[in-house]
Amino acid sequence: MAITSLDQLDPNGTYTYADYLRWQFEERVELLRGKIRQMAAPSVKHQRISIRFSRLLANALWQSPCQVFAAPFDVRLTRMRDDKEAKTVVQPDLCVICDPSKLDERGCNGAPDLIIEILSPGNSRTEMKDKFELYQEAGVLEYWVVSPIEKTIQIWTLDEQGFYISRRPKVEGDIATTPIIPNLEVEVAEVFAE
């Protein structure tokens, strides 16, 4: 049976990537440990910040084996050959993938090297807790959380034991960098300029 409306799904049910692929409705959703999370349409401010990051990342990755992708772009946080049973499918605002074997016609199968999430009203808990845990467990090397309200960039880096270590938040006047993209320099003030 075709699922053409989000209302046809049990909000308390548990779903897999195989289920997700059959859904034919307009709403954007993610699966977090099998649970549906509906995504709101991004605001103008959110889009402005995303496009600035996209430009900076694309320029820094020119002629690099790494590639940047922007939402909507499915990332299955698994590395199973048959990923249909995966229970986590996210759409990060931006992600950088340096291993081309993780890319297929449906998106990314495995952990990106870098994920950037831009907070929106109502998604802070999900980004800060649920996705933090998922990205850490999956082995995402760096996770950046961008706060348009506070005008900060919080960067977590995966340590050798597989846990995120936080750096001091980047604020206006700072430049955010990453060893994943050695020539990337993000001027915080430029990202949040009105």
Image (cartoon, rainbow, N blue to C red):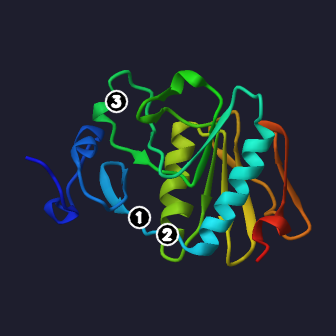
* Mark earlier in primary sequence (1, 3): 1
Residue holding disc 1? 39
Secondary structure of the residue carrying tag 3 is helix
Q: CA distance from mark 2 to mark 1?
A: 9 Å
Sort mark 3 into few (<14), some (14-19) or many (20+) by Cα contacts within 10 Å: some
Q: CA distance from mark 1 to mark 3?
A: 22 Å
Viewer-proximal residue, 116 or 103? 103
Residue that appears at 67% across and 58% down: 51
Q: Nearer the viewer, mark 2 or mark 1?
A: 1
Residue holding disc 2? 123
Viewer-proximal residue, 87 or 59? 59
Residue that appears at 60% across and 58% down: 117
Q: Nearer the viewer, mark 1 or mark 3?
A: 1
Q: Where residue 3 is drawn, which disc sits there?
A: none
Q: Position of residue 25 (x, y in %)?
A: 25, 57
Amino acid type of disc 1?
Answer: Met
Q: Position of residue 189 (x, y in %)?
A: 84, 69
Residue that appears at 60% across and 45% down: 95
Q: Position of residue 30 (x, y in %)?
A: 38, 54
Sort mark 1 into few (<14), some (14-19) or many (20+) by Cα contacts within 10 Å: few
Residue holding disc 3? 83
Q: Quadrant of residue 187?
A: bottom right
* Vertical relation: 33 (above or below) 46: above
Q: Quadrant of residue 144?
A: bottom right
Amino acid type of disc 3?
Answer: Asp
Secondary structure of the residue carrying tag 1 is loop
Residue that appears at 48% across and 63% down: 126
What is the quadrant of the C terminus in the image?
A: bottom right
Viewer-proximal residue, 69 or 158? 69
* Mark earlier in primary sequence (2, 1): 1
* Vertical relation: 154 (above or below) 70: below
